[in-house]
Amino acid sequence: MIGPQRAPGWWHRLDVTVRDLPLGLLLLAGSFLPALHGKGTQVGDLPTRPFDVLTIAVLGLECLPLAGRRRWPALSLALVSLGFAVDQLRGYHSVAGTALPLALISAGAHLERHRRVTALVCSAAYVPLAVALYRLGSGGETVSGFVTFYLVLVLAWGVGAWLRSTRAAEAERRRRVAEDTRTAERTRIARELHDVVTHHVTAMVVQAEAARYLTAAPDRLDRTLTAVSDTGRRAISDLRHLLDLLDPDHGTDTGGRTPPAGRLLTLVEQTRRAGQPVEFTEEGTPSPSAGSADLVAYRVVQEALTNALKYAHGSRTSVRVRHDAKEITVEVGTDGSGPATASVGGSGRGLAGLRERVAVLGGEFSAGATDDGRFVVRARIPAGSPA
């Protein structure tokens, strides 16, 4: 037995013609109710006549094509209009005549091609029908009555056209939202790649350059090459982790998505091995509910140390990170000239990308030279934002 909650899903899986058929069957059945005889649409003043042998075919021609009103709107409108014309000319005046405005609404909403031609043909076909009904009648119906009914039909078409334009506008809105979402996701991935690749590759380049001058000191050369290998392995690990996030089957464990605070020390040690003197201070205990604030703080330190290696290699650098219940504060300062012009502009990544990341979480970010000649990156990141 299908429960009430499963019925809608089951119903929508049926073919559209099957779902549209009950409306036509309902009108057809209602047309044969004795209480509704002669109570339907009447154009002109032909007297109502009782049903005869032809009635079943005429009413079926009016009602059953509604099953195809969305899949074949033009054909459905043509058949319903033909049945309506015979209904009026024969004087049945059945409630099946309601099928005509329904078919017009569906055609206005779902017809994709030759819409103007269809509207003109229907308008032209109405003229001989009105003339025939006028001549067959007793003259009680005035021209204004025929014009009024025509305007009702035009209104039905207009309602369908409005539904069509509304549906198209909603589809366009959803398309724009999907495109904006894809663009934002591509930007996020590009920033992650920038942070991971730039830091590790910069460290490897600096270490490799230093190794060229250590050929006379095998022990130091071996340590330097080992550091290069370790940096490369970490780069591969970080890249694999980032690519795993693009795989929808990578699992639901989110514990490894955000670099834990303990990795800040690893990051600092890696920068030290690349020849950058770094003083590291960490206060407080990282909150388990910090959310994506931990990741952003990690990226701020990572980008600042990368820029220190690139633009002020060998200069003293200090890293201070403070955790509390409400926010994470990061400050990275480097002696000497900083990367103000090289990193803040350009592609929108680097420090500019960090500014956007921090702003999304409602924090504050600044990067620039101080009066004493240091380049300082500061960030205040509210904790507790979802990753």
Image (cartoon, rainbow, N blue to C red):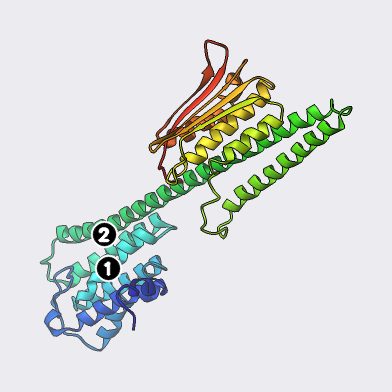
Q: Which residue is mark 2?
A: 156
Question: Disc 1 residue type?
Answer: Leu
The label number, if any, that marks residue 100 in the structure image = 1
- For marks 1 and 2, the one nearer the N-term is 1
Q: Residue at x 40, y 69 (%)?
A: 75
Q: Residue at x 23, y 82 (%)?
A: 29
In the rendered view, would you say 316 is above or below 83?
above
Determine whether the residue tagged by mark 1 lies in a helix, strand or loop: helix
Dot 1 alpha-carbon crowd within 10 angstroms: few under 14, some 14 to 19, many 20 or more: many
Q: Quadrant of residue 300?
A: top right
Question: Disc 2 residue type?
Answer: Ala
Left or right: where 126 falls relative to 271: left
Determine whether the residue tagged by mark 2 lies in a helix, strand or loop: helix
Left or right: where 309 falls relative to 4: right
Q: CA distance from mark 1 to mark 2?
A: 9 Å
The reply to whether residue 194 is in sight is no
The label number, if any, that marks residue 136 in the structure image = none
Identify which residue, 284 or 247, lies in the foreground: 284
- Residue 206: x percent and y percent? 74, 29
Q: Residue at x 34, y 84 (%)?
A: 1
Identify which residue, 240 or 80, lies in the foreground: 240
Whether pointer 1 and pointer 2 mark residues with C-beta atoms closer than 8 Å, the reply is: yes
- Residue 185: x percent and y percent? 52, 45
